[in-house]
Image (tube, helix red, strand yellow):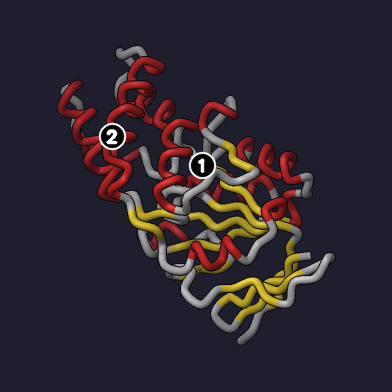
Amino acid sequence: MNYLLQTQGILFDLDGVIADTRVVLKETWTKWCNRNAIDIEKIREVSHGKRPFDTISIVAPHLNTLEQVKILSEIENSICHRLTRLNGIMELLNSIPDIKWGVCTSSTRECAVSKLQHAIGYKPYCLVCSEDVEHGKPNPEAYIKAAGILKINPANLIVFEDSKAGIESAKTAGCKVIGVSAASNKSLLIDADYVIHDFTDIRVVNITDKKATINLRGNSITLL
């Protein structure tokens, strides 16, 4: 069955969507936990899709959160070159006009820029990071802010996400959500409107001044 989805722009999460950062995040949090005598299982229970600030506030309220976020970012930056780019993402990004897409991530700006440089080689026109919002995912603030930067109504945006918190954030903002399972667990994506494995064979085609069509594994998304 083919589906026709209309949208004016596309927003991507970073970790687990543009790049597979599981190895990086696991080592980062393990080092941080060992340093602070924190059980790594506590991190696994609450961290997926959420800002480091929010995760640390939950698992280690006795620590200086801002100071610990800085330390965590330093650890992550030192090993972020070990990430891998998701299949097909570069081809998809290259086919979308710059002013029509952006990244909305729970990473700090420093880490997000580093990861994007390693994954795709540049920072996009629209980039919303953890410091840019008062409330992190699953709150919709991040996606609402990104929509404002693109000057597009959230209802006219498609979001690619890999986490339960991210999907809730995007849907509450009013966006259509496509879950990406390559670096995630499909069970976490049940609230997404559609689910794909990765970006293999997904392309934007038939671009004009007013619209383009994204072929999504036989399904079509029209970029107006």
- Expressed as whole percent of the image width and height from the top left, the position of residue 86 reads 41, 62
Residue 41 falls left or right of residue 152 = left
**Residue at horizontal 71%, vertical 74%?**
213
Q: Secondary structure at mark 1?
A: loop
Pinpoint residue 12: horizontal percent, then vertical percent: 55, 53
Residue type marked 2:
Ser
Of callouts 1 and 2, the N-terminal one: 2
- Contact, mark 1 vs mark 2 (Cβ under 8 Å): no
Q: Amino acid at mark 1?
A: Thr
Report the front residue among 188 and 107. Answer: 107
Residue in the picture at 62% in, 77% down: 215
Instruction: Tell me where residue 80 sits by quadrant.
Output: top left
Q: Residues within 10 Å of mark 2 (few under 14, many from 20)?
A: few
Q: Which mark is residue 105?
A: 1
Q: Which residue is situated farthest in the front direction here?
A: 121
Q: Which mark is residue 85?
A: none
Q: Where does residue 206 sit, x and y in percent of width and height?
A: 73, 77
Q: Quadrant of residue 224?
A: bottom right
Q: Is residue 221 above or below residue 89?
A: below
Pick the residue in front: 52 or 14: 14
Q: State the residue position of label 2.
A: 78
In-front residue for pair 182/164: 182
Q: Which residue is rendered at x = 49% and y = 63% of the image?
A: 89
For mark 1, does the 10 Å Cα neighbourhood hold few (<14), some (14 to 19), or many (20 or more) residues?
Answer: many
